[in-house]
Amino acid sequence: DVLDVRALGSAGAYTFDPGFMATASCESKITFIDGDKGILLHRGYPIEQLAEKADYLDTCYLLLNGELPTAEQKAQFTDVIKNHTMVHEQLKSFFNGFRRDAHPMAILCGVVGALSAFYHDSLDNNNPQHREISAHRLIAKMPTIAAMAYKYSIGQPMMYPRNDLGYAENFLHMMFNTPCEEKPISPVLAKAMDRIFVLHADHEQNASTSTVRSVGSTGANPFACIAAGIAALWGPAHGGANEAVLLMLDEIGTVENVEKFLAKAKDKNDPFKLMGFGHRVYKNFDPRARVMKKTCDEVLAELGINDPQLELAMKLEEIALKDPYFAERNLYPNVDFYSGIILKAIGIPTSMFTVIFALSRTVGWISHWKEMLSGPYKINRPRQLYTGSVKRDIP
Ligand code: ACO
């Protein structure tokens, strides 16, 4: 209903499609979504099966290369990623330029963009090998940089990656261990973390991925493209929603206040929205949310947590789903409604939630960037519907 084709003077006819609700900006073989049926496939495989039977590095390999790895390919790929987990030692001093209370997404934007200044040797976008090395570097270094941002914010020494640990396990090690005390990471928590990474790995042309493609279409280097994706992800309408869900639950406070806040969410004069509800594409249910809810139950059972915020979240979901306002508009909990609760249970601070989304989505971003550069593409250059003044002269 927003599609409106207008003639723009002698420039010809353009499609006016605010928010790109009905515009496909590219062809892609990576991810398929049927929002009405709640289907999400990566390279043909349903997300539910990937979450159950594959781990994050399998999913990375699949997104980048088109097929799940054989055992031998997986071992090689894991080795390559482990080879790149360290960051340049000088990058550490980069962190000192930030205030301790800086939001870790601000740090991530800056530091990831700066990687192009450290890895000059892989910046030739026309060279497929360079594109591959950049992809591996980004997948390998994101957990290290994310954990460094966290350690910097709490004033603890940064931890070096441990290559004898799995991808998610190593991330939790760098987040929570210290040089004085290295505790083993719970396999249930490492599995839950890995599943969060898998569920966020890609989602076709969402705002941040289309930003990465757009910036990449100018020929910018991959680290700059990913920094742009991080910036796009930061907003509360996109990746910032998982952080916003917890802040909203804090604001609601108790189960008794749910009805009051639902009324606010329905009031068109009130900017309050139910964070973690609704999705641009899924107008039935978000298949990732179902897997996430199951993982959420597992993690809380493992940790023996009886979280009042979870109780509040469940009550909110129950009441909202019965409310005709949400049903009429097809508003269901999305993946971020549950991921925040799991991250909180693992002990991740709220300000790191979107950073973890960025870490997970890096493989999706770089796979799209690589796919675009591997075929014919044009610089992204949309037109506009001009609504300003007609031509006039300065008196
Ligand atoms: N709470 C209350 N009402 C809502 C909500 C919500 N969370 N989301 C949408 N609506 C209403 C809108 O006000 C609108 O009502 P109207 O038809 O009476 O005007 C209707 O539902 C349609 O909403 P749109 O904003 O047109 O839907 P759109 O597809 O543009 O937006 C979005 C999708 C941005 C995700 C929106 O639902 C939202 O802001 N949700 C909350 C933030 C959130 O959870 N974001 C995470 C997205 S998932 C991800 O990034 C992984």
Image (cartoon, rainbow, N blue to C red):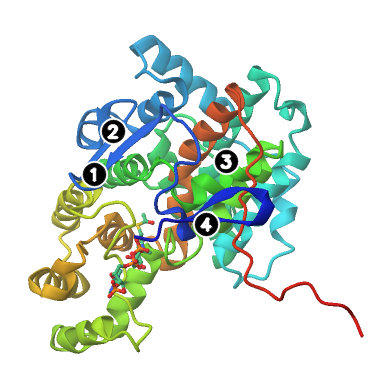
Q: Is residue 277 left or right of residue 8?
A: left
Which residue is labeled 3 in the image?
213
In whole angstroms, how far apart are the C-alphas of marks 3 and 4? 27 Å
Tell me the crowding category of disc 2: few under 14, some 14 to 19, or many 20 or more residues within 10 angstroms, Cα based.
some
Among the two numbered marks 1 and 4 on one chain, the one whose residue lies closer to the N terminus: 4
* Circle 1 crowding by C-alpha within 10 Å: few under 14, some 14–19, many from 20: some
Residue 173 placed where, x, y %? 44, 46
Secondary structure type for disc 1: helix
The residue shown at (17%, 44%) is: 37
Q: Earlier in the sequence, mark 2 or mark 3?
A: 2
Between 336 and 23, the one lying in front of the other is: 23
> In the drawing, what numbered circle is on residue 41?
2
Left or right: residue 130 versus residue 288 is right
**165 over 12 or under it: above or below:** above
Ligand 1 shows up in the quarter that is: bottom left
Q: Which residue is mark 4?
A: 6
Q: Is residue 86 above or below residue 215?
A: above
Q: In terms of secondary structure, where does tag 4 sit?
A: strand
- Between the C-alphas of marks 1 and 4, the distance is 55 Å
Residue sitting farthest toward the front: 10
At x 20% / y 82%, what residue is drawn? 262
For the question of whether residue 180 can be seen, the reply is no
Q: CA distance from mark 3 to mark 1?
A: 35 Å
